[in-house]
Image: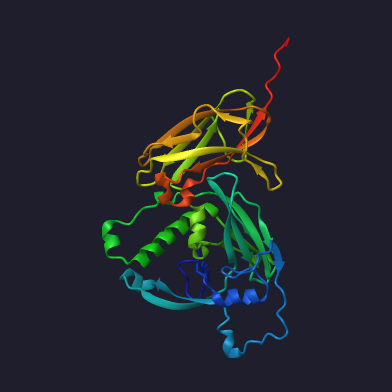
Amino acid sequence: SHLPLKPGQAVTLTVCIKVKLDFSGQENLLQDLNDDGISVTGLPISSPLRQVLKPRPENKPVSSESGKAEYSHVKTLEAVLNFKYSGGAGKVEGYYRELSLGVHVDVEPSVFFTRVSTLPATSTRQCHLLLDIFNPTEHELTVSAKNNQDLVLHASECQRMAIQVDKFDFESLPQPDQETVRFSNPKQLEEERQHAQGCQINSKLGICWILNHTHPSLRRRGEASVEGVLNQLVLEHLQLAPLQWDVLVNGKPCDCDVIADCKVGDAVTLEVKLTNLSKNSVGPLALTVVPYQDYQNGVQNYDLEDGVTFIGSNTFYIDTVKPKESSVCEGALLFLYTGDFFLNIKFQDDSAGRELPLAWFTLPSVHMRALDAPLQAGA
């Protein structure tokens, strides 16, 4: 609305600069936090749920002026803003002038992920991603993620955020073509693979931060990425296993702490379904179902010959399963008295599955509760 400018007039242009830089692998900062008692990736320190930055020991030497740069966690971003302008008779003739303005921006991190780990969830298709988050700013910081409670961090404070996520199907990511594989070294291909996996995880997490400055005009917001801090072990735990197992009791799936109720003396059908999401055929496989009782005191009773009996064999066989196909094996058992029972499904040592990664054979826990059959009227 201020253009074109009349002689003697001025206009102010506001340029918003949004910076995305990688602050992972800051060994100096991690060592600095370690000295102050903060949980740090790769260091043998137990991670607190909530911990305030401790004061430095008095005997710790103070960095000299020359050493400040070594412990500086500021990154520099340089850019050039190019302007073109014209006016008057020159514009009519198609002439214009150019102005180049150099920009030097010092960028400090808003959020540090000092430690990343995982814990299993109740479902075999989910897990908990644990992030130890450090607020390096001098103001209160709010960190949020999709479908998760906000985390409020005071200045120089570290807290843990637990995010329950669905495991990721990395097999569905685009694969490099043969020509790319031929002209790329293995290290480069591995870095590109981890980058693609990190991008997929970031898109699902949606981690954002808000700097809660007392003055509204100084409040800032942005996004945080875990891409640079995900190690190979964490990626393996976040990956959806190429072999997906489903266990059904009387036609109903057992997962997420589901307790399957059944009646004493009635036959209970048991189905084990394997879906092969890998790129190769799998099998044949042999599975043995072993019932037991857990007394919740460290004792597990596997001697249940008088309590559980199988109708047929307790060993299930699965033939070769081709990629993108499924196979189901069925059996049946019955309970002779009431109680809570669990099923431990083991793979026999002579099955072909022993050469595959152990993480591919994660079956849902099966919890069954045998109840008395209701009395018949008039009995």
In the image, residue 271 sits, relative to residue 297, either above or below, namely: above
Which corner quadrant holds the C terminus? top right
The percent position of residue 39, horizontal first and vertical second, equals: 64, 68
Instruction: Looking at the picture, tell me which residue is in the foreground, 216 or 235.
Output: 235
Instruction: Looking at the picture, tell me which residue is in the foreground, 55 or 69.
Output: 55
> Which residue is located at x 43 percent, y 61 percent?
194
In the image, residue 192 sits, relative to residue 363, either above or below, namely: below
Q: Residue furthest top?
A: 378
317 to the left or right of 163: left
| Residue 141 visible in the current orientation | no
Scheme of image coloration: rainbow
151 to the left or right of 188: right
The percent position of residue 3, horizontal first and vertical second, equals: 47, 66
258 to the left or right of 279: right
In the image, residue 297 sits, relative to residue 270, either above or below, namely: below
> Which residue is located at x 35 percent, y 54 percent?
175
The percent position of residue 4, horizontal first and vertical second, equals: 45, 67
Instruction: Looking at the picture, tell me which residue is in the foreground, 93 or 219.
Output: 219
State the count of labels. 0
| Residue 344 visible in the current orientation | yes
In the image, residue 336 sits, relative to residue 30, either above or below, namely: above
The percent position of residue 261, horizontal first and vertical second, equals: 63, 29
149 to the left or right of 197: right
